[in-house]
Structure formats: structure tokens, C-alpha cells
Image (tube, rainbow, N blue to C red):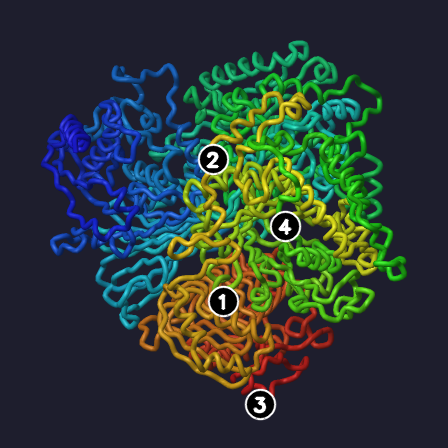
């Protein structure tokens, strides 16, 4: 109370000091009894205080904006004065938070359950309290510790989502706020100070000046900072948005500027150029706050809602006509809106949120699409839709005229063809900048020749740059960060329409006020500039052409200065940059160009990444960064990762002169010209080759941005979204301030030394670059690679494998299939080779440090117990051959471990035990395998569910013992899996429900797992369909993974897998393999520590994988917190892999990773080989445990105190002298005494082994349990005959409804063996994933509406969604289901009498669906089935579509602008078969739904059919529905399946008989 009184007294003093008449205090009436224990323990004292407007504000405007500004500024003053008065405390009782201080709005919020908010705050049930509007936002903490001030909504925004660009946004806001050093700061302000008198928080003009200037915001002695990375993303967003609203931006205007729509080439804005001009103008000034977000906002003058540009969280609404507005937002639930007859607008997070909403009263149900906004003026009551409100805002200023007068554009221009160096000088320059032969032979050839990044395989098994004995470019010390779970990546391949690489140069004006000066910028179409574009840029320096003053600054310095010269050179560079910007320079060009060979020989250079980072941060410190743009002109940038690093640390553009010179050099080589003449390369000119290179880099940059969920390069620039591995504090503080570097490392002088090491010793006539072997191993000369053919040979000798023995040779004639006796001695040689090898991983720097004496090995748990913890990596069938995939599964099942299917699905024959093995170990069921035993099982223990949903069927799900959700892959986190076309054989295509020969690149995981809540929903789906299977979630090591792991644990995952960034892959872009993801040692310790600290460790098993090869690796992982261990590449080697590294080419010489029949026959492995390997590893673990004095692995799990740094290892490489592994161990809780986390705690506090329990869905599956437990339903399933009809009410908390029943059917009868019929009608608003995994024989009818993911994974049967019979709205114009419906569907018939949301039919491979309109990205990545849309659709239709047919009704001739033409073709109905298919599907739709739209179309068919477009990919071009009968192939299908489960089809060219018509209608 003493503290509280002191705080209250100070608040009164601050108010009075700022002329606010203080009226008094009121303790807010609350009822603490309704709170939970955690909320009650942290409940603050809650008070309200009241003030009057200052008398001096007699000139305030009619809306009282001056008074609002004073209240706003005084509130920011409170924290400053509290700190000055010593009224800040570090304990939980010391937090003072002002929820709101406004004359227009008031915020009631808290760490309470949504249902009890109004019970807790008694004011909310007091009839004396009335309001024109209310924003009600429920958001719960899943991945952070909840606190009262973090509760939503904030002061002006309710934010449902994540801001992926937060680091960059905060950095740039702070850069704007910084003040030039010579300007006075403090209490004594000159009268002519350009900031005005920031002490006056009352005067109308003074406060307006404060809130419209950037450099008035960061004066700690006056105002609380606007942004701070210690706050949440929502709090920072709210703070900047609030300031923009105070600075005379209207609230919709501020949000349009901060969260812009994807306006470029947007067909919806074709008739509104003023809106496009608005976004162009503000996009040059302000970096977008980008990420999946639904924002509901109010400044007290209007209320509105808006979606981010991707629309992953769409908004739906219902509307009446009395003018009242209700807007709600709830994390993880898509929002909707309905309009009723009295004009009321209800904005809700999902359908069914508002109870007792009469469907008959609703006149409109709508949704917000990506980037759209709605707004209601609280003074006039006007409702304004997206175009109206945005056009109104955009017309307030002549943005288009300003841009035309002021902006200059550097557009893409053909590159110069003249060489700058001769070949000798060019090669010498390349060598000094760290180029190797591989960079030209692999990267430049693919990029310049084919306009694409190099694809490679097998992961990154080379040493970390900081452990390597060879010199590395500085970029290699940085790992790209990526989105996983808490925020989603973007799909740059299929959803690139929302992305842009445009950048700007020049001085940027304040973001808080609008003037023509803000348009005066240079806009760059691409961040990668060629020579011609640099000339164009230089022309803008002329006064008559813009007058953008420019200055070149050389980053070269004398070689004779030695490595220590870098510091002096860097100081001089930064000083010069500051001097030039102060002199008015608006474009700085940091250049390491050497004029000639002599200069190259006499000088070295500051690595461009060090240079740009240092200049960027120095300009920020000086308050000058917004006054100039930075161009890096360098010879040390050629890979996409290099460009990402340069832009990420401050560059606005890059001129890679030497990369372009290298393209010219490569193009002129005889070898290149011969390849073009032979057709191996497409013929190009020199300019075209350079443009190809740029396209490849740009696509690579889009991919890197997309991994972090960032759409715009302007938001990535300066965001520093990297983690450094092996850089010291002096380097970080100088050039990379704020970047995480957990283990220390190189100094500036070390970096200079390494740069000099790359230089050739002398110039030679025909110089050749060094082949560093960073990608492909170069025996003896190149970089060390842990996995090699030599290592494979050593392991094969140990486990008794002869690679020459296979089905193609003499295996059938040899005893025991040619398996030789295993050799302990050879395994010890294998072990020794790894122990004495060069350093490669962090764990190589560690050693064991036991706290007790050794024990006899006989006392240690047996190998059989240890092997049960072993798992195989998630290697898909497709990436591996059948032989390799099935052999691994059988072997791991034999040892009681856990094999993993990977993301390609599995043949259903593998779900049954093998019982037909003869005395030679052969099985007719698996004739391609050897060494089998009766009782073996080829069914993988873990079945993986990935973003591509390949092979995910009900039977696949129910035959798993564990289901794994692939959030990320170690080799390429943030990207989807990739399977090259040649590996998609007929068999593989059949399993994956795709087209043979067509490359499969899965989308990144964002469709139904774009947030922690949606991941929780997928976990819920999987627990519903298979209650006995645990659910694991696969993550990749990165800074922040501890927070993510806590969220995953709270989402009811049973296992969390931490993969290292060095994991293997069958195919991946090269830069992804090398530069994304961190070592598992870092991620594992962080996750283990966070889970332990947050009391969540007992809820999950921790599994780790990534380069684990030996018992030592296993024990290291155990001590760092892992309970299970995954083996990937080494397990492949154990079955015959020889490390040829051609997995992506389908040419594996031993058939491990090939789908070619002749190569598969060369597969040499048997299950015994793999069992032998795992036996050796387990015995090695036993030996190490005995040495440490421990009897079982459980005793050492999480015991990081048993490890220490190895002094001898640290001294092996010069680079490691600066490493500090003490940081690595800091923060890991000591668990030596409390081992309770090793067991799960169940009801009653009882502890049981984690393997014995799985999480079970709660009340959200009660309806599913009721349905599954219905006696009639159970009887039909048991007897596999008959029909049951059930009717049930449903509400939006009933989730995954139908999944449990589908699982029961699949468990009993497989995917298509059910002969009964179960028909269920639900009435109400269904929760997420309604009808998930429906299969033949199951009909679900929903009378009401559905949310997201209706029909997810549908495999057969029928789903029908119709509005209530008494609905007052037009069904065809209203939203009836949410986003990502039919995601991953493999069959079934679907009908929705209304509109769907975004991403309808993504990865549909067999469902036949009819709906009456859709949002963006309809039919994305579709590989089969048919979709019919009877209404308008959003943009990007058919992106990535490689199979199936789409029919789209186009009433207003707008469809052609909505199609992504990259793959699909568009035509009108051109065949009788196509017309028949479409008409019969619409007839079926009408019969099932009573659709008025279908009735109208059918009633005037001859005219209406002409309004349909048909889209199809090349794979369907010869089908009957697309082309003429003469050339047509296949059957005409009008339904996924008939009632008896047989395919329903017509012979080509035939008409349907009445019986067939009735059969389909039935």
C-alpha cells in the first residue's frame, strides 16, 4: 500500500504539472473469486483516475484532438517520472501499467478467462455503463508466461496474430528517433531547436509538433520510448499505431500504412489507382509490419478491422441495421462478420462465438479477404467496406501527383556486356574475395544458365565455419532465422503475388505526417543492380534529374597495414560516411572495386558485411540513418545468402560487379558455348545470362524472406534476422549490434586475417581457383566432410555389408544373403576415425566430466533397452527407394525403436505383419527385400504429416503408433519438402496422389499450422482420429526455440523433436542446406531448459536428430536433455549408402535413393545390417555410461553438469581461441537432484513412464465421442453393413467433429473397405476441422455454418454444408465455411451452399467439390479432383496446380485477372464431356443443397454455361473434359465415388442414362 500510495501521488503530480485538473481516484470494483490460481496470485490493484481538460486548450478542435494528445503524452510521461522518483521495482509487485488514458476509450482487461471477464469487472454488468461500441478480444498465452499487462486488447488495437518483421520494424523506428549528436537534448532547449519545446505537453501546436516528428520520440528524460524489444509484438504495434493516430493520421489511414495490402497488380484495385498511389507513397516511408494478423481497432472516432496481406486469419462478419457495432478477435480463430436486419454489425473470431444470434435476423454474412478492411464511423454510424474506406483515405492527398513529380525509378535494364577485367585479373579478384571452383561450376552455372539456384542433397556435414581449418567468407558465420509454429513462413513459389523486392534510396521524411517531400525517393525495382542500372542511379545526382547527391566510399585498405589495419580502415570509413551524410549526401556507395591488378595486389578490403553493418549502425547512432540510403558495390557477393546478409544488415541495394563479371567470363568459355550448342544449356546472350543470374538471386531472396514469413524486402532490410555462430563481442557490437552470438568467436583482426588467407600467393598466366570443397568433398585437398565414402566403407566392414552383393548380382546364391559377420574391431576403427577427425560440431569441443567413479559394464542397462530410444530420421518413400525405406522400418521395428515414414505416405500393405517368409528370408509380399523373418513389420512406428499431406489418409493415420507433424526440416527449415520429377514414379505418384514425373515441392507449413493455436488444432485432429497414438512435433534448432517448445507442449504434443541444421535431405536448394538452422546442441539445451523452467518438461519427450552417428553423440544428446535419438544419413549408410551425393538426380549407384528399377536391384542392404549398426551404437553407449559411473541413460538425461569444455580440442584450430562455451552452459537448470521430469504426471499427481500415456482431447471432442459411441453407429461398423441416421446439435467448441468416427471406421475396414452407410446431420455452428478425414460410407450434413479446415484430409464419403432454413441472407453471397477447406483431400464429394474462405482445395488430389465462391489461392497446389465455383473468387487461382480440373462461373468477366497462369491453362467449355461433367455436378449440388444459384444457372443453362471457365494443368490436357474426343484419354467422372464405393464414371463420349443420373443423385 505504501508503494501504491506513492505511485498515485506521483501520477497526481504529473497530471497537475501538465495542467490536468485532477478529480480523484476510484478503485475498480472486481470479484477476485472468479480468477484462477495463477491470475489471482498475480492480480494487481486496479484503479481509475479522472482529470479535466487544461484551460489553456481553449483552441482545441471540435473533436478534442488536442486534449487526446495531452492525455497521450502525459501517460508516456508517467513512466519517466516513476523512474526518476525511484518508484520502479524489479519484483512482480513493482509493475505500474496504465491500461488507458483517454477521453474517448476505456480498456478493461486482465489475465482472466474470457467467460469470467464481465464477472470479474463488475462495471461490465452495471446498467449505468453504456458505450457506442465494444472491442472484445480473447487471447491466451501459449508460448510465453502470461502477465496482466500483456492481456489483449492493447490501448487502440486488438491484435490476433504475430508480427514476423518485428525486429526490423523496431530497429527502423529507433533509427528514426535517433537525434543528430550536436542537437541539444535535455532540459535546456534552444528556442530554435527543430524539435520544439518537448516539455510542453499541453499547448495545441506544441503537442502536434511532438507527435508528428520522429526525433521527438526518444528523449528518455521526457517521454517513455515508443518501441522496445522487451515488449510483445502486439504492444509495439499498438504503440506505433497509437502515435500515428495521435499525429493526425486517421485510424484506418495509420493501419493502411503500417499493414499494407499486396497492391501490386491486384485486380481488386484496378479501378482505384488512388489506393495504389497511397500504398506506393507510404511504402517508401514506412516498412510494413508484416505477419499473419487480424487487427480490430478504434481510436474512439471510428472502429474497424483489417487483415494482413496473406489472409491466413480471415475475418467474417454478420450485420444488422441499428448502427451498433460489435467487433471481436480471438487468437487462432478466423474472424467473421454478420449483418442483421437492424443494422448491427457483429465481427467475430469464428462463427458461433455470439450466442443466441438469430439467423433470420441476419441480412448479410461476409468476410474480409487478405489485406482488406472494414470501418464504421462512430459519429455518423456509416458502414464502409474495403474499397470505400481506402478510397476515402487515399483521396485526402494527391499521392499520385506527388509521386509523378518527385519519385525517380531505377527499372530493370539489360546488363552491360563489356568486361571490366581480363581473365587472369578476374580470377585473381575472385580468389581474393573467397570464390572457389564450386561457386562457379555449381552456383554460377545453374544461376546464369538456368535462372535457378543449385539443387543439392545429403545436408551439410562440413564443419561449422568457426571450427573449419580453412578460410570462410564472413557470411558463413551467419545462420538465417526462420518461422516455425508461432509464426508461419510464406509460400514464395505459389503465393509470390504478396511479395516484393522493391527498395528505396534517399532521405526519408517523418512517418507521422504527410507531405509531398515524402515522395522524393529513388525507387529500385530490384535490390540487385547491374552496371547499367548503376549508371542510371548516378544520373539522378544531377540537379535537373532529382538532385540526389551521391558519394562513393572505398572499403579497401593497404595490405601492408596487416590484419590490425582493419580497425583503422573501418573507423575512417564510418567517419567519412557520417561526414558525407551531414553534408547532404543521400546515397552512399560502399565499394571494394579495385581499378586494376596492381591495386588488387597492394590492397585488401573490409568484408562488405562488416562494412555495411558498421556504417549502418554508426549512422543510426549519429541520428543520420534515415537521411541516406546505402548501396554495397562488392566482389564478395554471389550466393543468395550473401545478398540476404547484406540487406539484412543495412544495405538498400547491392551491385555485385564481380558476380556479373564472372557470369560474363563463364559465358565466354568454350565449355559453356559447347553446352549451349549441344542443347544442354539454353542459348543466351551475355546480357540474358546476367539477367538469369539476377532472377535466380531474386527468387532465392524471396525464399529466404518467406522462411521468416516476411513479404517485403523493405521489412527484411536492417532487420538482422540471423544468428551468428563464432563471432566475438567486438565484431557484434561494431557491425551487428543486437545479433545473437551464443558462443563468442572471431575478433575483427581474426576476420581480417581470414580474408587475407584467401589471397593467391602470386599471379599466374592461367590461374585456377581453389576448390575448397565446401559442398562436394574433395579428397585430401578440400574441406572435411564427416560423411564420406571412406567412412561408409569403414562402417560397412564393421556391420558385414558388401556393397557388391545385391539382387542384381549373386545375393540369392550366397549364405545369409551375403551378410558377413559383424566385427567389433572394425567398429572401433570406425569410431576412432571420427574421434580423430577434424572438428565439425560444437559437441566436438566438449568432454565428459563425471562426478563419480566408473562401474563394471555389467551393471549398465542392456543394449536392448537403449535401442528402444533409437529412431530413424523422417526420410520419405520417394526420397528413398522402396527397398531402403522398408529395410529401415523392419530393422528398427526389430530392435523396438521407432522408424519414421517421412512425408510421402506408405503402402497399406505395410500396415500388416509379414507372415509369408520362406526359409531363404524371402516374402512374396515383399519380393524385392532380403533377410526377412516371419513376424517382421515394415510399418513405420511414426507416420509423418507434413505440409504437402502426401499419403495422409485415414488408414495411414490409424495404423501409426505415433503421428509426427513436420513443422520444419533440418536441411531447409521454413521450406517444404522437395522430390524431383524423375523420382516421382508411377508407384510413388500413386502413394502421393500426384502425377508421375511432376516435381513435388511441398508448401511451407502455413495452411493449417500458421500459429501455435492452429498447430494445437492439428494436434487435436490427430488425437481425434487416432486416440492411441502420441503426437510429435518436429522443430529445427534456432534461437527462441525454447519459447516455441513451451507453446508446443501446452498445445498437447507428446513428443518434441529438435533437429539440427545439418540434417540430411533428398533434394534442397544449396543455400538452404548450408545457411539455415543451428546445431542441435544449442536448440536442445534451450528447449530442455525452457521446458524445465516452465514446469512443462514432464509433459513431453524430447527427441533430437541431425548428424548423430555414434554412441558418444547419443550420450552427449542425453546429457543435454534428449530422451530419444534420431539417426538419418548414418542409418542409410548402414544399409548400403556410399555417399555418392546424387540423391536429387535419381542416379544412386546402390539403389538407396533411386526409383529406377535397374538401380534399385543394386540395393545391398538387409535389416540385419542396420540392426548390427544400432547394436554397436548401443554397446558404445553402455561403455561410456560405465566409464561415467552411471547405470542407465535416465540417470544422465539433462545432466549438463557432466560436461566440460575440452581444452585439447579447443586448441586444435586457431579460430576456436575466441570461443566461449561457458555461455553455452549458462542458464541450463541443474537437475541432478530433481529427476521428476523424466516421468509424466497424471491425475492425482501419480508419475508414470511417458511412453505409457498420450494426451487426450478434452470437451472439444465430446460430440465426436457421443457420435462414435452411438450404438447404431457401432453396430454398422462392427457388421460392416446397414445404415444409421443420426441428428445432433453442434457448436463452435466441438472441434474435429467426425474425425474420431472416421478413425474407427478406418481401423476396422481400412480406407475403402467399409460397406455400411452412416449419415449424420449436425445443426449449428461447427468448430474447426469439421468432417476431417471423412471416408467412404460416411455422410455428414451441416445445417448452419463451419469454420476453418472443413473436410481436411477428406478421403471419401460426402460433406454438405447449408445455411439454416430460416436464414435471412442470400446464401450465394454469404460466407458459410472458413479457410483451407478440403486441405489435403484425397477423395469424397463436397458441397457448400455459400462462399468459402481463402485457400480452398489446397493440395486436393481427389475430392469433387462445389461451392458458391472463394477467396484467394483457390485450387492451390491441387493434384487431382474437380472443383466447381458458382461465384466470384479471389486472386491467384490455380497456383502450383499440377492435376485436376476447375470450373469457375464468371458473371462479370473478371476471372482472367484472378488466375495464376504459370502452370494452368484457361479455356471456355470446349467439349461435351466437360460440359456434362460440370452440369451434372451442379445438378447434384442443387439436389443436395437446394442452392438458388445452382437453380438459376441450370434454369438458363445454354446461356449461363458460356460464363464458365475451365482451368487445367498440362497433365490433364489430353483428358476428355479438356480436349476433343479423338485425342482424349481416360474416363469421365462426375463424382468422387458412388454410394457403394465404386468409382462413378462414364465411358468417353457417352451420355448418362437416367439410371446413372439417379445413381449420382443418390
The quarter of the displayed image where residue 1509 is located = bottom right
Q: Nearer the viewer, mark 3 or mark 4?
A: 4
- Please tell me which of labels 1 and 3 falls first in the chain: 1
| Residue density around tag 4, few if under 14, some if 14–19, many if 20 or more, within 10 Å | many
Residue under label 3: 1555
- Please tell me which of labels 4 and 2 falls first in the chain: 4
Q: CA distance from mark 1 to mark 2?
A: 44 Å
Q: Nearer the viewer, mark 1 or mark 4?
A: 4
Q: Secondary structure at mark 1?
A: loop
Q: Pointers 4 and 2 in contact (CB under 8 A)?
A: no
Front residue of 835/1267: it is: 835
Which residue is the extreme one toward the bottom? 1554
Q: Nearer the viewer, mark 1 or mark 3?
A: 1
- Is any atom of residue 1022 visible in this view? yes
| Residue density around tag 1, few if under 14, some if 14–19, many if 20 or more, within 10 Å | many
Residue under label 1: 1332
Q: Nearer the viewer, mark 4 or mark 2?
A: 2
Q: CA distance from mark 3 to mark 2?
A: 74 Å
Q: Position of residue 1456 (x, y in %)?
A: 54, 60
Residue under label 2: 1230
Q: CA distance from mark 1 to mark 3?
A: 31 Å
- Please tell me which of labels 1 and 4 falls first in the chain: 4
- Is any atom of residue 501 visible in this view? no
Q: Pointers 3 and 4 in contact (CB under 8 A)?
A: no
Residue under label 4: 870
- Please tell me which of labels 3 and 4 falls first in the chain: 4
Left or right: 1357, with 765 as reference point: left
Amino acid at each position: 500500500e505504501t508503494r501504491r500510495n506513492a505511485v498515485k501521488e506521483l501520477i497526481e503530480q504529473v497530471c497537475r504539472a501538465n495542467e490536468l485538473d485532477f478529480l480523484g481516484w476510484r478503485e475498480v470494483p472486481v470479484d477476485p473469486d472468479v480468477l484462477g490460481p495463477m491470475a489471482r496470485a498475480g492480480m494487481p490493484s486496479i484503479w481509475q483516475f479522472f482529470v479535466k481538460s487544461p484551460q489553456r486548450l481553449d483552441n482545441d478542435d471540435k473533436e478534442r484532438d488536442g486534449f487526446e494528445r495531452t492525455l497521450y503524452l502525459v501517460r508516456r510521461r508517467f513512466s519517466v517520472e516513476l523512474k526518476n522518483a525511484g518508484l520502479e521495482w524489479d519484483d512482480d509487485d513493482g509493475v505500474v501499467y496504465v491500461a488507458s488514458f483517454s477521453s474517448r476509450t476505456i480498456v478493461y482487461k486482465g489475465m482472466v478467462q474470457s467467460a469470467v471477464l464481465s464477472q470479474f469487472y463488475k462495471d461490465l454488468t452495471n446498467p449505468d455503463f453504456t458505450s457506442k461500441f465494444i472491442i472484445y478480444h480473447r487471447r491466451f498465452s501459449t508460448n510465453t508466461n502470461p502477465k496482466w499487462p500483456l492481456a489483449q486488447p492493447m490501448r487502440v488495437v486488438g491484435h490476433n496474430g504475430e508480427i514476423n518483421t518485428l525486429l526490423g520494424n523496431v530497429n527502423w523506428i529507433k533509427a528514426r528517433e535517433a537525434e543528430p549528436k550536436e542537437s541539444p537534448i535535455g532540459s535546456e532547449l534552444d528556442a530554435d531547436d527543430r524539435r520544439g519545446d518537448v516539455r510542453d505537453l499541453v499547448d495545441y501546436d506544441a503537442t502536434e509538433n511532438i507527435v508528428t516528428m520522429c526525433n521527438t520520440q526518444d528523449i528518455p528524460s521526457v517521454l517513455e520510448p515508443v518501441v522496445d524489444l522487451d515488449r510483445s509484438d502486439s504492444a509495439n504495434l499498438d504503440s506505433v499505431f497509437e502515435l500515428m493516430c495521435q499525429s493526425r493520421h486517421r485510424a484506418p489511414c495509420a493501419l493502411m500504412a503500417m499493414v499494407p495490402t499486396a497492391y501490386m497488380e491486384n485486380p481488386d484495385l484496378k479501378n482505384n489507382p488512388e489506393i495504389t498511389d497511397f500504398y506506393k507513397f507510404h511504402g517508401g516511408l514506412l516498412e510494413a509490419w508484416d505477419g499473419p494478423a487480424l487487427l480490430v481497432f478504434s481510436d474512439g472516432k471510428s472502429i474497424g478491422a483489417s487483415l494482413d496481406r496473406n489472409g491466413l486469419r480471415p475475418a467474417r462478419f454478420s450485420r444488422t441495421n441499428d448502427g451498433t457495432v460489435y467487433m471481436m478477435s480471438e487468437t487462432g480463430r478466423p474472424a467473421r462478420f454478420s449483418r442483421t436486419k437492424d443494422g448491427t454489425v457483429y465481427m467475430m473470431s469464428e462463427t458461433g462465438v455470439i450466442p443466441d444470434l438469430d439467423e433470420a435476423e441476419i441480412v448479410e454474412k461476409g468476410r474480409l479477404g487478405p489485406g482488406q478492411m472494414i470501418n464504421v464511423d462512430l459519429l455518423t454510424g456509416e458502414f464502409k467496406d474495403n474499397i470505400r474506406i481506402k478510397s476515402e483515405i487515399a483521396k485526402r492527398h494527391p499521392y499520385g501527383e506527388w509521386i509523378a513529380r518527385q519519385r525517380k525509378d531505377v527499372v530493370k535494364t539489360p546488363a552491360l556486356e563489356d568486361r571490366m577485367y581480363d581473365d587472369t585479373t578476374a580470377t585473381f579478384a575472385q580468389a581474393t574475395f573467397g570464390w572457389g571452383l564450386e561457386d562457379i561450376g555449381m552456383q554460377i552455372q545453374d544461376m546464369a544458365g538456368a535462372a535457378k539456384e543449385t539443387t543439392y542433397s545429403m545436408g551439410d556435414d562440413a564443419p561449422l565455419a568457426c571450427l573449419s581449418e580453412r578460410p570462410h567468407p564472413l557470411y558463413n558465420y551467419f545462420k538465417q532465422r526462420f518461422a516455425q509454429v508461432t509464426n508461419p513462413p510464406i509460400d514464395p513459389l505459389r503465393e509470390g503475388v504478396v511479395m516484393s523486392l522493391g527498395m528505396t534510396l534517399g532521405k526519408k521524411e517523418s512517418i507521422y505526417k504527410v507531405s509531398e517531400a515524402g515522395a522524393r525517393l529513388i525507387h529500385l525495382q530490384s535490390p540487385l543492380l547491374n552496371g547499367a542500372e548503376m549508371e542510371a542511379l548516378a544520373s539522378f545526382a544531377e540537379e535537373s534529374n532529382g538532385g540526389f547527391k551521391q558519394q562513393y566510399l572505398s572499403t579497401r585498405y593497404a595490405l601492408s597495414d596487416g590484419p590490425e589495419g582493419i580497425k583503422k580502415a573501418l573507423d575512417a570509413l564510418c567517419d567519412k560516411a557520417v561526414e558525407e551524410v551531414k553534408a547532404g549526401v543521400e546515397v552512399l556507395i560502399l565499394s571494394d572495386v579495385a581499378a586494376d591488378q596492381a591495386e588488387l595486389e597492394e590492397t585488401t578490403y573490409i568484408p562488405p558485411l562488416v562494412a555495411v553493418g558498421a556504417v549502418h549502425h554508426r549512422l543510426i547512432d549519429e541520428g543520420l540513418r534515415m537521411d541516406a540510403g546505402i548501396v554495397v558495390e562488392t566482389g564478395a557477393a554471389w550466393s543468395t545468402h550473401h545478398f540476404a546478409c547484406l540487406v539484412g544488415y543495412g544495405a538498400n541495394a547491392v551491385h555485385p560487379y564481380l558476380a556479373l563479371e564472372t557470369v560474363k567470363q563463364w559465358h565466354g568459355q568454350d565449355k559453356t558455348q559447347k553446352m549451349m550448342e549441344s542443347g544442354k544449356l539454353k542459348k543466351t546472350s551475355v546480357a540474358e545470362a546476367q539477367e538469369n543470374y539476377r532472377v535466380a538471386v531474386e527468387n532465392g531472396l524471396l525464399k529466404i524472406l518467406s522462411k521468416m514469413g516476411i513479404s517485403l524486402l523493405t521489412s527484411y532490410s536492417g532487420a538482422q534476422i540471423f544468428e551468428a555462430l563464432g563471432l566475438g563481442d567486438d565484431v557484434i557490437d561494431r557491425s551487428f549490434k543486437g545479433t545473437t552470438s551464443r558462443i563468442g568467436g572471431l575478433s575483427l583482426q581474426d576476420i581480417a586475417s581470414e580474408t587475407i588467407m584467401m589471397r593467391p600467393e602470386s599471379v599466374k598466366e592461367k590461374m585456377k581457383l581453389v576448390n575448397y570443397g565446401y559442398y562436394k568433398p574433395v579428397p585430401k585437398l578440400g574441406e572435411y566432410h564427416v560423411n564420406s565414402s571412406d567412412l561408409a566403407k569403414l562402417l560397412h566392414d564393421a556391420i558385414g555389408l558388401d556393397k557388391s552383393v545385391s539382387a542384381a548380382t549373386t545375393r540369392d546364391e550366397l549364405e545369409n544373403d551375403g551378410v558377413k559377420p559383424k566385427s567389433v574391431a572394425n567398429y572401433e576403427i570406425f569410431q576412432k576415425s571420427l574421434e580423430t577427425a577434424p572438428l565439425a560440431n560444437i559437441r566436438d569441443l566438449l568432454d565428459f566430466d563425471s562426478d563419480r567413479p566408473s562401474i563394471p559394464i555389467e551393471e549398465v542397462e542392456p543394449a536392448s533397452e537403449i535401442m528402444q530410444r533409437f529412431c530413424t530420421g523422417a526420410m520419405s518413400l520417394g526420397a528413398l527407394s522402396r527397398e531402403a525405406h522398408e529395410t529401415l522400418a523392419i530393422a528398427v521395428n526389430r530392435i523396438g525403436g521407432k522408424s519414421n515414414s517421412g512425408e510421402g505416405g506408405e503402402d497399406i500393405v505395410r500396415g500388416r505383419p509379414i507372415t509369408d517368409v520362406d526359409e531363404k528370408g524371402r516374402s512374396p509380399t515383399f519380393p524385392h527385400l532380403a533377410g526377412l523373418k516371419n513376424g517382421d513389420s515394415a510399418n513405420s512406428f511414426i507416420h509423418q504429416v507434413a505440409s504437402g499431406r502426401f499419403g495422409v489418409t485415414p488408414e495411414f493415420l490409424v495404423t501409426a503408433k505415433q503421428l509426427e507433424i513436420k513443422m520444419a526440416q533440418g536441411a531447409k527449415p521454413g521450406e517444404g519438402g522437395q522430390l524431383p520429377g524423375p523420382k516421382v514414379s508411377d508407384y510413388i505418384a500413386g502413394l502421393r496422389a500426384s502425377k508421375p514425373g511432376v516435381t513435388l515441392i511441398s508448401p511451407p507449413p502455413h495452411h493449417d499450422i500458421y500459429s501455435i493455436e492452429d498447430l494445437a488444432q492439428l494436434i487435436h485432429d490427430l488425437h481425434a482420429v487416432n486416440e492411441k497414438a502420441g503426437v510429435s512435433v518436429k522443430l529445427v534448432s534456432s534461437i527462441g526455440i525454447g519459447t516455441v517448445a513451451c507453446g508446443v507442449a501446452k498445445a498437447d504434443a507428446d513428443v518434441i523433436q529438435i533437429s539440427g541444421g545439418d540434417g540430411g535431405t533428398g533434394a534442397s536448394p544449396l543455400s538452404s542446406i548450408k545457411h539455415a538452422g543451428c546445431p542441435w546442441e544449442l536448440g536442445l539445451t534451450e528447449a530442455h531448459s525452457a521446458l524445465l523452467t516452465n514446469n512443462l518438461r514432464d509433459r513431453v519427450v524430447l527427441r533430437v536428430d541431425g548428424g548423430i552417428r555414434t554412441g558418444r553423440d547419443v550420450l552427449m544428446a542425453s546429457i543435454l536433455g534428449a530422451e530419444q535419438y534420431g539417426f538419418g544419413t548414418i542409418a542409410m549408410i548402414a544399409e548400403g549408402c556410399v555417399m555418392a551425393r546424387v540423391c536429387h538426380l535419381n542416379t544412386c549407384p546402390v539403389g538407396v535413393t533411386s526409383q529406377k528399377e535397374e538401380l534399385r536391384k543394386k540395393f545391398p542392404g538387409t535389416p540385419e545390417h542396420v540392426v548390427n549398426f544400432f547394436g554397436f551404437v548401443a554397446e558404445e553407449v553402455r561403455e561410456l555410461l560405465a566409464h561415467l559411473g552411471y547405470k542407465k541413460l535416465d540417470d544422465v538425461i539433462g545432466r549438463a553438469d557432466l560436461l566440460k569444455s575440452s581444452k585439447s580440442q579447443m586448441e586444435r584450430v586457431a579460430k576456436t581461441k575466441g570461443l566461449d562455451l561457458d555461455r553455452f552452459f549458462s542458464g541450463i537448470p541443474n537437475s541432478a537432484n530433481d529427476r521428476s521430469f523424466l516421468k509424466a504426471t497424471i491425475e492425482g499427481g501419480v508419475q508414470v513412464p511417458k511412453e505409457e500415456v498420450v494426451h487426450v482431447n478434452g470437451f472439444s471432442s465430446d460430440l465426436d465421442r457421443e457420435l462414435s459411441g452411438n450404438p447404431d453407429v457401432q453396430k454398422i461398423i462392427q457388421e460392416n453393413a446397414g445404415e444409421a441416421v443420426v441428428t445432433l446439435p453442434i457448436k463452435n467448441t466441438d472441434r474435429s467433429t467426425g474425425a474420431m468416427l472416421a478413425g474407427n471406421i478406418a481401423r476396422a475396414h481400412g480406407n475403402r473397405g467399409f460397406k455400411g452407410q452412416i449419415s449424420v446431420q449436425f445443426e449449428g455452428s461447427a468448430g474447426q476441422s469439421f468432417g476431417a478425414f471423412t471416408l467412404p460410407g460416411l455422410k455428414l450434413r451441416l445445417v448452419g455454418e463451419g469454420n476453418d479446415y472443413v473436410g481436411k484430409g477428406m478421403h471419401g464419403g460426402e460433406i454438405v454444408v447449408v445455411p439454416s432454413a430460416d436464414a435471412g441472407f442470400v446464401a450465394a453471397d454469404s460466407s458459410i465455411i472458413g479457410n483451407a477447406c478440403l486441405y489435403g483431400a484425397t477423395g469424397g464429394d463436397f458441397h457448400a451452399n455459400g462462399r468459402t474462405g481463402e485457400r480452398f482445395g489446397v493440395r486436393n488430389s481427389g475430392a469433387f467439390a462445389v461451392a458458391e465462391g472463394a477467396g484467394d489461392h483457390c485450387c492451390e497446389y491441387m493434384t487431382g479432383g474437380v472443383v466447381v465455383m458458382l461465384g466470384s473468387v479471389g486472386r491467384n487461382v490455380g497456383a502450383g496446380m499440377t492435376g485436376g480440373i476447375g470450373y469457375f462461373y464468371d458473371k462479370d468477366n473478371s476471372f482472367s485477372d484472378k488466375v495464376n497462369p504459370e502452370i494452368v491453362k484457361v479455356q471456355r467449355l470446349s467439349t461435351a464431356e466437360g460440359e456434362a461433367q460440370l452440369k451434372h455436378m451442379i445438378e447434384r449440388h442443387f439436389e443436395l443443397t437446394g442452392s438458388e444459384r445452382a437453380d438459376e444457372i441450370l434454369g438458363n443453362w445454354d446461356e449461363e454455361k458460356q460464363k464458365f471457365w475451365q482451368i487445367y494443368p498440362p497433365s490433364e490436357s489430353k483428358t476428355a473434359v479438356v480436349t476433343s474426343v479423338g485425342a482424349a484419354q481416360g474416363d469421365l467422372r462426375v463424382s468422387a465415388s458412388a454410394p457403394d464405393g465404386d468409382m462413378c464414371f462414364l465411358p468417353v463420349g457417352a451420355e448418362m442414362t437416367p439410371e446413372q443420373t439417379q445413381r449420382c443423385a443418390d
